[in-house]
Amino acid sequence: MRKFWLLFAQATTIGLAVLFIIHTLRPELLPKAASSGGIVTLHEDAAETGSQLPGTGFSTAAKKVMPSVVNIYTSTEVKANPLLDDPRFRFFFGDQYDDAATERSNSLGSGVIVSDDGYIITNHHVVESADQIEVALADGRNARARIIGSDPETDLAVIKIDLPGGLPAITFGHSDKAQVGDVVLAIGNPFGVGQTVTMGIVSALKRNHLGLNTFENFIQTDAAINPGNSGGALVDVNGNLIGINSAIYSPNGGSLGIGFAIPVSTAKKVMEQIIQTGSVTRGWIGVAIQELTPELADSFKLGNRSGVLISEVVRGGPAEQAGVRAGDILLAVGDKELTDSTSMLEAIAALPPGKMAVLHLLRNQNEVVAQVKIGKRPKPRNK
């Protein structure tokens, strides 16, 4: 029995040695199951080196959006010198200065195609006072554009081009679902170098009191936005439009990581009105308002309630006709409670002219209700 176990042990040792030698020198002779025992098989991407890694790039979103973003070039005729129009100047020097009497001022910006028949949304300040507007598409085509309408109080404008075939319209997203920290892409034509895509995050929401527009509800982003990006697209990682790039904070004109975009919810409302009627109509009651500081709130004994102070009432305006007085605290418009001047402007502006609205006021510590007939908001001056 002892010899039997000795022979078995020797045979086993020799067999293992043979397997080791074959595994080392000629592994292809072994069955697959034996050769892979204890070894993890890696499934590598067959694509060429340098291709996009899944989930780490945004090329799909960029490719989706880039055809919908256009470059806008405008030119405006300006007087070179008022003296050149003086008849006495012309009497002595003749008409040889006619060609110098005017010169052209050029500017650039961006825009977003919102319909396949050629409507484009951009910033009011991009096309303001422009005599000629030239639009360059991402596919190399160019077209002359005309202004459909403009709204300086939100800094939005709609222009239109006419080209054969359907144009690549952008997909609208939901700016009200955006959250701080969401990744976004900004697409435009910075400094006229050509279409450019930059990436960042949503830095803040509902930025207002910046003194840029009358109606402010900006999305703040750190995606690089520079001069020429105005009117371009701010999109989410799926390539859906969530904002129109409008302004930057910069002492020197370059990007410092503080850019502002108009939410697509605001842009869509303005765009629809402009396309339908050529302008934007808003409600108005004829008052000047002031923010309630903590000191003012204490003096009026507001407690936990919020509102805005009516500092002035326009003579003959809807508010005066409804009995509203300077010094009243406007607490709510209908069932919408007011927290600051921005919420008050938005609440009144959203009401159609001619509609009756209920104002909830605080006057001498007593609540007062006033019925006001909404008027039409006057056009801003110097626009």
Image (cartoon, helix red, strand yellow):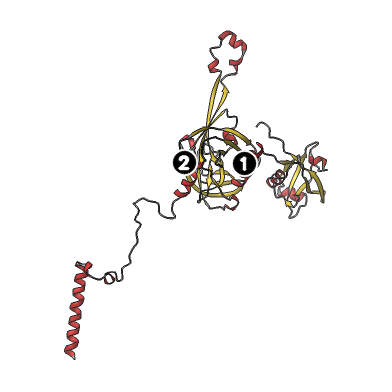
Residue at the spot 79% in from the left edge and 41% down from the top edge = 319
Q: Give neighbour class at mark 2: few <14, some 14-19, many 20+ (Cα, 10 Å).
A: some
Question: Which quadrant does the C terminus fall into?
Answer: top right
Inspect the image, locate mark 1, and give the three-letter code of the amino acid beneath it: Met
Q: Which residue is mark 2?
A: 196
Element on which disc 2 rests: strand
Left or right: 64 in relation to 284: left
The reply to whether residue 282 is visible in this rendering is yes
The label number, if any, that marks residue 285 in the structure image: none
Residue found at the very far top of the displayed protein = 92
Left or right: 357 in relation to 99: right
Left or right: 325 in relation to 84: right
The picture quadrant where one finds residue 129 is top right
Element on which disc 1 rests: helix
Counting from the top left corner in percent of width and height, residue 15 is at 19, 77
Inspect the image, locate mark 2, and give the three-letter code of the amino acid beneath it: Thr
Q: Nearer the viewer, residue 324 or 52?
A: 52
Q: Nearer the viewer, mark 1 or mark 2?
A: 1
Q: Give neighbour class at mark 1: few <14, some 14-19, many 20+ (Cα, 10 Å).
A: many
Residue at the spot 56% in from the left edge and 24% down from the top edge = 77
Residue at the spot 17% in from the left edge and 85% down from the top edge = 7
Count of numbered tags: 2
Counting from the top left corner in percent of width and height, residue 62 is at 47, 46
- 79 to 281, vertically: above or below: above
The label number, if any, that marks residue 271 in the structure image: 1
Q: Nearer the viewer, residue 316 or 233?
A: 233
Residue found at the very far bottom of the displayed protein = 1
